[in-house]
Amino acid sequence: MHVITLTTDFGTPDWFVATMKGVILGVNPRATVVDITHEIPAGDIRAGAFALAASCRSFPEGTVHVAVVDPGVGSARSAIAVQTLDYFFVGPDNGVLSWALRSEEIRTIRRLENEKLFRQPVSRTFHGRDVFAPVAAHLSKGLSIAKVGSEQRNYQRLSWPEAKRGRRRVAGEVIYIDRFGNAITNIDAQSLLASDWDRGRVCVGRRVIRGLKRFYQQAPEGEPLAIIASTGFLEIAINGASAAGRLKIKPGDPVTLQRPFGQSSS
């Protein structure tokens, strides 16, 4: 396969993304480069980690996923490539790859040390262009990952905040705000197997939302709703508006789902 994905906080007004793609195509003209997103808030490693984890398994086997949210660029932080059963992941070893790797069977982790694979000279401020892009391009052409550098036993992990489930209550938090202002939480659909949860109450801040909807327009326009979204997680939204803006929601805010009164755990 020759598919390479890019997830960064670079935005698109400047030349950063285009130069990464230029370097990739210079090494592998047959590569198909797919933008997952370049609108991660600057330096927000958790947001980058979630965006990559939410999307990476939609791609064919052999895809090389590059994630660059790298406030420590030029420092002593290591740069790594990880081969899993199905994919390659390339990026700084600062946790941005870790949420995607939680669901992967890891074969090997390698430090990016082979400078023959880098674009020269290597800038201290743009490893996305000079290190990660060319290494990803070489991997997409079939280069053995063993040739990128020495093996590393582990990688930096961001802690995943597990939702806490009780008989009558699931407690979680907001993980990610998408461009529509929808607030995605860490409460996954598997936590809500009992059929009566969809008639419960979702509490975020001082707002109480009653019941779960199946689609956005099931709520009146301008009204908040809770829904199990395409990510497989509980999401707080507003039909036709930004829930984050209207309800002043931000990542880390607590969210609870309570069972309807008079119901017992199944």
Image (cartoon, rainbow, N blue to C red):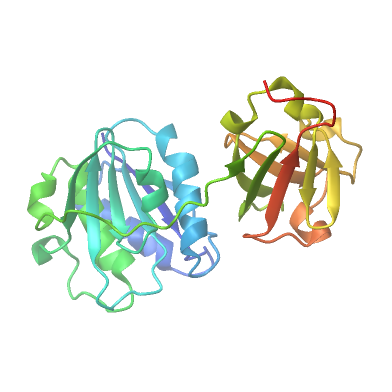
Q: Quadrant of residue 115?
A: bottom left
Q: Is residue 126 visible?
A: yes
Please state which of residues 18 and 245 is positioned toward the viewer in this rendering: 245
Q: Quadrant of the C terminus?
A: top right
Instruction: Choose between 54 and 16: the one closer to the eye.
Output: 54
Identify the residue at image location x=28%, y=58%: 133
Question: Residue 20: x and y, percent?
Answer: 34, 60
In what quadrant of the picture does the N terminus appear? top left
* Front one among 124 and 109: 109
Residue 166 lies, in percent from the top left, at 64, 38
**143 to 192, vertically: above or below:** below
Q: Is residue 123 left or right of residue 169?
A: left
> Percent from the top left, x then y, of residue 85?
24, 33
Left or right of 241? Residue 253 is left
Please tell me which residue is depicted at 11% across the width and 54% down the height of the picture: 151
Q: Residue at x 82, y 31 (%)?
A: 260
Q: Is residue 214 visible?
A: no
Q: Quadrant of residue 61?
A: top left
Q: How many marks?
A: 0
